[in-house]
Amino acid sequence: MILQAQEWCDSKMSGMTLVAPPKPFEKDPFPEMASINAKWVAVVPYAFTPNNEARVLFGNNHQWWGETPDGARETIRLAKENDRKVMLKPQLWMHGQWVGDMEYTKDRDWIKWEKDYRDYILSFARIAEEMEVELFCIGTEFKISAVKREAFWRTLIQDVRKEYSGMLTYSANWDEFETMPFWDALDIIGLSSYFPLTEKKDPDLRTLKKAWIPIRKRIRAVSDRYQKLVVFTEYGYLSVDGCAGKTWLLEKRRSELQTNEKAQSIAIEALYQSFIDEPYWAGCFYWKWYPFGYHRQKFRANDYTPQGKEAQETIKRWYSKFNQY
C-alpha cells in the first residue's frame, strides 16, 4: 500500500486546517490560504458527545454552519474551485473531557455510542465520495476506544470503504500511535503531532531539532512496520512562551502567558527541518487557520494560528518547498 500512497501523494502535503465558521463565508477564504502555498485543506465538521451520555450529535441547527453537512459541502466546493486538495476530517468534541479518555463501563453504552458514531462517519464518507475528496479521516485521538473496541473500528473501516473510494487515515494522538491496532487496515498513518519537546520558554533551533531525533526514529519504525506513509494530520504551536512543551496544558493558560511569535516560528522551523527529507513523511496539516473576518484579533494573539505572525512567513517559505517534493 505504501507504493500506492506514494503515487497518489505526488508531493509533500502542505496543509492547513480551516476553522469552520459559525455562518456562511463572508468571502472566499482560499485565495488567502493559497498565498502561503497551502495546497491542502483539512475540513473539520465537528460532532458532540455530551458528558456521561452514549450519544453523538451532529448536523443540527445548534451547530456552526461550517460544521454541518451543507457547510462542509460548500467549504469543499470552494476548496476545489481554488484547486486545493481536501482531507475531510469529521471530529468529535466533548465538553470538559478529551475524547481519548472517553470510556463506558457497560457494553450496551459502547454499542449505542458506536452506532451513532458510525452514522456520523458514514454520512460524511458519502459527502467525501460525492465531492471527490482526496483523503478521509475516520477518527481522531480515541486513545481508549481504539484499543478496547478494535473490532468496531475495523468494521467501520470496511463500511467506509463501501461508501468512499479514496484514501483513508486515522489521526492518532502523539502518545498512542505506536500501539494503534488497525494501521494495517488503513492507507496512511495519521498523527496528531503535539510531542512535548522542551519546557524552555525560548528554545533555540538546535535544541528543538535534537529533541526530534528519538521521536523521528519511533515514527520511522512504525512506518517501516506497516509499510505506510505518515502524515501529520495535526501539528501546531501556540504563539506563547514555552510553546514547544505540553501544549494541552498551555492551552488552559494561554490568556495569561506571554506572547512569543518567535518561539512559535522556530518550533515550526525545527519540525520542517527534521522531517522534510524523511521519505516516509507525507507532509502535514497545520492547526489552524481562520476564515476571512472570523474571530477577533485579540484572541488570535496567543492562539495556534500563524496569521499575521512571524510563523506565517516560515510556513509560506517551507510550503513552497513542500510543493516541489
Image: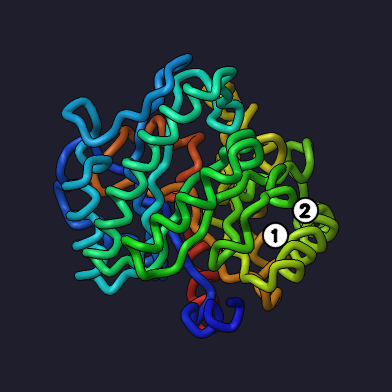
Quadrant location of the C terminus? bottom right
Q: 87 or 222, which is in the foreground?
A: 222
Residue shown at 63%/37% (left/top)? Answer: 143
Left or right: 154 in relation to 148: left
Pointer 1 local density, CA inside 10 Å: few below 14, some 14–19, many at least 20: some
Kind of element beneath mark 2: helix
- Disc 2 designates what residue? 208
For marks 2 and 1 on the same chain, the one whose residue lies earlier in the sequence: 2
Residue 180 is situated, as x and y percent measured from the top left of the image, at 67, 49
Residue 222 is situated, as x and y percent measured from the top left of the image, at 74, 62
Left or right: 31 in relation to 323: left
Question: Eyeballing the image, is 187 above or below 233?
Answer: below
Q: Is residue 31 visible?
A: no
Q: Amino acid at mark 1?
A: Ala
Residue 45 is situated, as x and y percent measured from the top left of the image, at 32, 43
Distance of label 2 from label 1 (alpha carbons):
6 Å
Kind of element beneath mark 1: helix
Extreme top residue here? 52
- Disc 1 designates what residue? 270
Residue shown at 53%/81% (left/top)? Answer: 4
Question: Eyeballing the image, is 70 above or below 217?
Answer: above
Q: 242 or 221, which is in the foreground?
A: 221
Residue shown at 59%/38% (left/top)? Answer: 149
Residue 240 is situated, as x and y percent measured from the top left of the image, at 60, 36
Do labels 2 and 1 touch, CB within 8 Å?
Answer: yes
Disc marking residue 52: none
Quadrant location of the N terminus? bottom right
Left or right: 302 in relation to 21: right
Q: Amino acid at mark 2?
A: Leu
